[in-house]
Each structure stands twice: as structure tokens, then as C-alpha cells.
Amino acid sequence: MLLAIDDTDSRKGMCTTFLITELLREFDELDLMDHPRLVRLNPNVPWKTRGNGAVVIRLGNGVEKKDLVGFDGKEIFSYTGEYVDTEDALERALKVVERWSETSEEGTNPGLIISNEKPPYEMYQEAVKDVVKLEDTISALEKMDCRYTGLGNKRGLIGALAAMAWIPSDHTYELITYREQHRWGTKRKLNGIVRFDKETEHSFDSYDHEEKQQAVAPRSPCPVLYGVRGERPKELLGALNIIEGESIDRWLLFKTNQATDEHIQESKVGEVKPWTSVHIKGTVTSLPKTIPGGHVFFDLDEELTAAAYEPTKRFREIVKKLIPGDKLELYGGIREEPLTLNIEKMKVVELSEKKVKVANPQCPDCKKRMSSIGKNAGFRCRKCGTRAEEFDIETKLVERELEEGYYEVPVCARRHLSKPLKRVLLV
């Protein structure tokens, strides 16, 4: 039995991953088959709540114990065995969703699916890379051996179906810990995040050492205490002994598509589409410009504006060093109005030569330096009247303050799906 839910939270509280712990309590007569799954979808859709993540569990009768994947009063293991469906599963799961979802908040529209078959992988690919219509999701559900329901406008069915369709070829893990309920909405108390980040070789995006900012604890009043991400489950479990502070009520270890770049699609500068994320190649055609608010913009191939927004902090200083002629590969999301690429990663493929002015042109007849006759108007010899163009000035090459290679936004500004260079350079 595959069980998937999405869109149960709001900006004011709750977390869809927390409902998985409640569903495991509800179906305690069944065993968890494999890790619970946290699947992030298109980060650019305008109606997302926070991280646009849906969750999936697979339930059955366990035969052989595999991995420790959680704790909720007792240890939770995953098993191998046979999948099992129950006739009243939809009704039981819906009660859990109704009890815990933030349905009083506008924009919270839970979707719940219970299925005996896995949807086509294309359902996931479309939802992680593009915008999916609810009617197309319902049409697909009607053709499957499944039961489904939802609350509000039921838009959560889109994410639930897509998450169910995910095949974890490239994948990572996230250990998510949850707070005692009486602490929800209060300030989180955590120590040891820097130590965890330094001592776990295969974890990532836990702490921004330059900005001195943690990236494991959410800022919303949700049930999550912290979440640590990485390649190896056993390393992540070490956080339970390293990160200290308030008591942990329960925890789960999720298999996830985070840090995989699976939202990125290949595109060309003139063919990008709003609300998608792309990998494009192009040439810088304007000097970077900083506008009020600290956002930095430049043009690529005179067709697309690329941006390093203020939250990307020190990354903007790298972008400011670009000059026309630099050849780049950019990764990022496309904003609709104005059409802009929000940079997540950048590869400087080839640097253009940077020249600075040394002197005005020399008159070929008088051997005297010419004088400017106005901005972009050229030069003229005061003695004989001979003229020269702007490009006739004498220049010299200067060393660039930038090197070829990859650059990425800091941890504090990184999207869940963006593959950090720590993973890019290992693959």
C-alpha cells in the first residue's frame, strides 16, 4: 500500500512530514517498507507554501528487519516483505489529515492518495520541472488502482501523485526531529550545529560559516525542531548525539530528492519559460548593475536578465566581477515578470580579457595626445584637428579578480533541490 499526502501546512504552522509520524501511529498494525520519502517539487510554483514537499510511505507486512528509520516512543524500522492494503485505509488516513492540517488557512488544500500501483515516473518529472494542472492529475488518478480524496480545492493531489511516482535513482537523506507539542511556536534552543557540520564528512547545508547562520532549524512555528541532510544515514543519526538543546519528541529519517538538481532542465537563453528552473549557456552582454535593495542584474546574450538577489549575500560580489564577453553556464529559476533568471549556481566557462584605459589616442601627425570632444563622441587633436574614435584609446590588460570554475549561492540562500557543489564535484 502506497500512501501519499501533500499541502497540509501553511506559513503559520504544521509540516507535512509531521503527519507521516501520525499516520504511522494510525497504521501501527502494519510495517514501514523502506524509508519514508520526502519529495520536493517545482520550487517556482506561485502557490507553494514553503518548501513544496510531498511525502510518501509504503506499508505492508514486514518479514526481515532492515534499517532504523525513526523513533516515536519506540524504535521504528523499515522491513522487506509484502505490501498490504486495508479496506478502511482512506477513511483512517483522512481523519489524521483532517485533524492536523492547517485547513483554516487560505492556500492549504490537502491531497491524500492510497494506491496499489506506482504512477508513471513522468508524473514526477512534470511536477518537479513544470506546472501541472489539477484536472490532469485527477484524470491520471481515475485510470489507476487507487483511492483518493482531498480538502479545499484538493490541489495537494498534484504533489501527492508526483511524490508517489518518484524513483530515487540519485537521492539523499534528511533526518527530521520534532518538538514536544507544548513548545510549538516558541523559540528553538539548539547547540552543536557547527560541530555537527564540521564532523560529518557527507552532510551538507547545515551551517553557513561566512554568514554565521544555521540552516537546520525552520523559522516558522511548525513542529520541526531541526533537519540535517546528507548522503549517509548513519552519519545523520549522529546529530541525535551532537546537536543539543530541547528534548526531541520523535524523529524520522527520510529518503529524499533534495540536493539532486532534478528540478533543472536544459534550455536555451531565448526559450526559457516562466515558473521553471533551467541550465543555460550564454555570454555576458552588460556590466552588472546594482539596484536599490542590493539586487544585482546583468544581461545574457542580450535576451535574458540574470539576477543575484540580496538574500544571496556574498555571491553578489562574485557576480559584480563579471564583464561583457564572459562565457557562463547558469542554473536557476525563471521569474515571470519581468522575465528573469534567479541564479542558484554559476559556472564561469571562459573569462574575457579586461582592458583599462592608459591614455587618449596619439595624433599620428603632431604626436600629441588628443582631447575628448564629449562622452562617446571620440577625440580631436587641438593643434591640427585630426580625429580619432573611442576604440583608438591606448589600453592595457589587467588581471581578472575572478577565476574560471563553479560558484554557488551561500547555504543560507540555497533551495532544497539545488545540488551543492560538494555533491556536484563528487559526481
Image (spheres, rainbow, N blue to C red):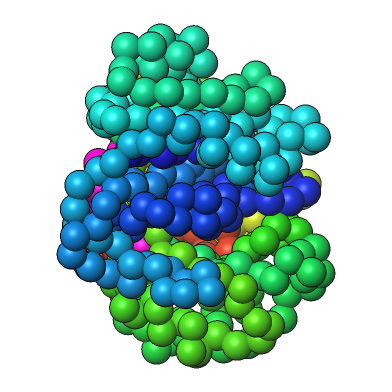
Residue 66's place in the image compared with 15, above or below, is below
Write down the quadrant of residue 99 in the picture: top right
Give residue 354's position: percent from left, percent from top. Answer: 40, 55
Answer yes or no: is residue 224 visible.
yes
Q: What residue lies at 39% left-to-right and 89% top-to-bottom?
A: 199
The picture places residue 299, in percent across and down from the top left corner, at: 50, 34
- What residue is rendered at 46% in x and 65% in y? 252
Q: Main secondary structure of the magenta part?
A: loop
232 or 157: nearer the viewer: 157
Q: Position of residue 270 (x, y in %)?
A: 39, 20
Q: Is residue 323 left or right of residue 19?
A: left
Picture residue at 51% right of the left edge, 16% below the top: 134
Which image quarter: residue 117?
A: top left
Query: What stretch of residues is rendered in magenta?
Result: 166-173
Do we see residue 303 in this rendering?
no
- Who is closer to the viewer here, 177 or 362? 177
Q: Position of residue 114 (x, y in %)?
A: 41, 32
Left or right of 103 in this view: 266: left
391 left or right, relative to 381 = left
Residue 355 lies within the magenta run: no
Left or right: 371 in relation to 360: right
Q: Measured along the vertical axis of the image, is residue 65 above or below residue 413?
A: below
